[in-house]
Amino acid sequence: MSRAHDRWAAYVARYHAGNPGITETAFEHARDGALGTPHDWLAAALPGPVGAVLDLACGSAPMFDRLQHDSYLGLDLSTAELALARARGRGPVGLADARWLPLPDSCVDTVVCSMGLMLVQPVDDAVREVARVLRPGGRFALLLPALGPIAPRDVRPTAALAAALRGPGSMPQRLGGRRLKAALGHAGLTVQAMHRHRFPFPLTSPDDVRLAVSALYTPGRTARQLRKAEERLARYVTDRAELGLPLLRLVAERADRARVVTMRP
């Protein structure tokens, strides 16, 4: 793995150690009418009983209460996130790398992954592991950040935030629909459904602004830059203000004869 990937992994570890539950908190804030939160939207892609579930990069395990599972296992690399999941009565959960899952072949019916796959390098290794542990006909449902849709009202606050946070360091990869479909296909997973949706993130108070900035991955940014980002975003606070949170939801299925490759660290 490259030094850049090593630095990114170290940053993510520090970030989640200092901000356990941050994604769940941000998603609880971004509710959209009947759809609910982004986590509710992900669960809605898997209606009814889902059998044995693996929650990959589970964080604080918000999906635990949202799925009709026979059994649940959450895996993550952050001990702080896992501790919070246990404190909230969710689990079992355990420490594991998505690229080398400590599970036998064809052992789960469903894999879910909310906002975690884009953090894994190389992503193809994680996708192959998902295909390996899924039973034939099993489903993989995931959420990722997306570039759209956005509303006209999102443009100015988003641009202000981006300008304040401009600098070195960024996400190690951008997983769009095309790149993701290719990785899934190579592993023997067939895309069944793919949707994008904009969730409204209210910006009605200074607390909302702080949450919006703190929920972002901002490697290499100084405390001064983060304060500047909050100050710029705060200019748009009103009793009806919001920031768009565009997400991609995808569901794939393992074919009967998926290409299963057992990975070893």
Image: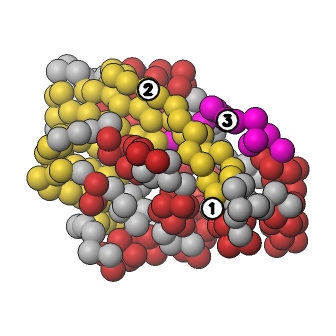
Q: Would residue 225 be visible to someone looking at this image?
A: no
**Image marks 1 and 3: residues in contact by CB distance under 8 Å:** no
Q: Is residue 69 magenta?
A: no
On screen, 67 above or below 142?
below
Residue at image location 28% in from the left, 59% down from the top: 64
Residue at image location 33% in from the left, 56% down from the top: 63
Left or right for 54, reference 68: right
Q: Would residue 149 be visible to someone looking at this image?
A: yes
Q: In the rendered structure, which amino acid carries the disc numbered 3?
A: Ile
* Stretch in magenta: 144-156
Q: Quadrant of residue 247?
A: top right
Residue 104, x across and y down, in percent: 18, 46
Q: Which residue is mark 1?
A: 215
Disc 1 versus disc 3: nearer the observer = 3
Q: In the rendered structure, which amino acid carries the disc numbered 1?
A: Ala
Q: Which residue is mark 2?
A: 194
**In the rendered structure, which disc, 1 or 2, sits on the residue that comes first in sequence?**
2
**In the rendered structure, which disc, 2 or 3, sits on the residue that comes first in sequence?**
3
Label 1 – label 3 distance at C-alpha: 19 Å
Q: In the rendered structure, which amino acid carries the disc numbered 2?
A: Met
Left or right for 147, reference 54: right
Which residue appears farthest toward the bottom when viewing the image? 87
Q: Residues within 10 Å of mark 3 (few under 14, many from 20)?
A: some
Disc 2 versus disc 3: nearer the observer = 3
